[in-house]
Amino acid sequence: MNWSDEEFGFETRAIHAGQSPDSATGAVVTPLYLTSTYIHSEPGVFQGYDYSRAGNPTRSAYEECVANLEGARFGFAFASGCLGATTVMHLLSQGDHIVCCDDMYGGTYRLFEEVFRKSGLDFTFLDLSEPAALAGAMRDNTRLVWIESPTNPLMKLIDIAAVAAIAHEHGARLMVDNTFMSPYFQRPLALGADLVLHSTTKYINGHSDLIGGVVITDDAELGGQLKFLNQSLGGIQSAFDAFLCLRSLKTLAIRMEAHTKNALAIAEFLQGHPKVEWVAYPGLASHPQHELACRQTSGHGGMLAFSIKGGLPAAKALMSKVRLFTLAESLGGVESLIEHPGLMTHASLSTEKRAEVGIGDSLIRLSVGIESTHDLLRDLEQAL
Ligand code: P1T
């Protein structure tokens, strides 16, 4: 069946794309194929699968479904978001230059600066909230532009269509880390991006019970290269984790709506609280790029950042007083999390780098879950 987005809505495709009843048993749900290898009827002749690093039916169904949701033909599931990023870096060669947004997940920054710079790749990090800044950073050897939108943790937005146009003018490709929005709210490939990454640890799986990543493209050449790299580097997602992600996709749409409803209520509450300096949530009219958020995404998601008055002591006091919000790294799960980027997710950045990007001591990040709105508000109110 062709689950085209012209014919079927997101929710339908999230439940059916890449999946049909099992031909051997009639099982409605895609079975979990726990096998490393597959029979050959004679040497070199097999029924589509020969070895699970190269392909596994459960993983294939999931890869097809998640790629479909991003409006693409090719998806590759990895053991983590970082392994997806690592594999993308292997599309490049020694001496190539990459331009990245300056505010990004600390682990991705560390991977680029402390691993791939040593292998001869060159990186420039800069604020791309104004896309025109990109043109000045492009060089003859720039092959890739790498952005998050919204950025982690400051929730800055980047105009994907504008950045794609500048990257392409200079012969480079654009990668968008779409982890915060999920394909339900933002479709970077339709805006001109060439590649999309998700840490599926977050919204795509949504239940905080696995680590995973996926890289998606609709470009046949990139798709072929990624297939080769995924098989050669071997950073594949396990069949069991692919099974869980495939199941989770079925509720992505309703989860994202619930995350957004709660996050907006919390952002509005925090914005009006005397102990809060500022709140960064793209769904608030006070967000400097609210207009872009409304144009580029169909919803604002569950992530927000805010600055508390009183610096680190006040931030620590709040994080010790919450009862429903769990003090933990990660995001995108059904349960609400609170964290301190400077001491937790972005601790791998030097103090100077954090200051330069704007990740201060009073910055707190929330991943708003899908618990009762009232309970979440009450928890923050008592803790503040
Ligand atoms: O943790 P992993 O699945 O390897 O994904 C890395 C990653 C990539 N991109 C973004 C935007 C991310 O937020 C992450 C992981 N982030 C966290 C663990 C965090 O708490 O921000």
Image (cartoon, rainbow, N blue to C red):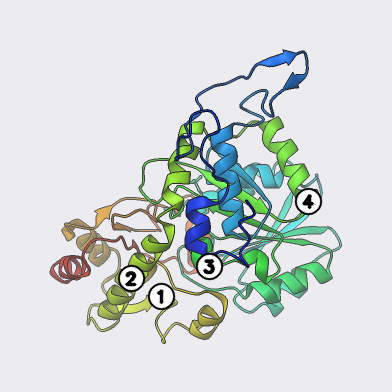
Q: Name the residue under label 1.
A: 281
Identify the residue at the far top of this view: 42
Q: Name the residue under label 3.
A: 356
Dot 2: what SS? helix
Query: Sequence-wise, which precedes: disc 4 or disc 2?
Result: 4
Count neighbours of disc 4 (C-alpha within 10 A) and say few if under 14, some if 14 to 19, many if 20 or more.
Answer: few
The reply to whether residue 349 is in sight is: no
User: The disc labelled 4 sits on which kind of residue?
Assistant: Ala
Where residue 263 is drawn, which disc sits there?
2
Q: Distance between the residues labelled 2 and 1?
A: 8 Å
Where residue 220 is drawn, which disc sits there?
4
Q: Residue at x 66, y 27 (%)?
A: 49
Is residue 222 placed above or below 52 in the rendered structure?
below
Horizontal side, residue 142 vs residue 3: left or right: right
Query: Sequence-wise, which precedes: disc 2 or disc 1?
Result: 2
From the image, state whether disc 3 or disc 2 is nearer to you: 2
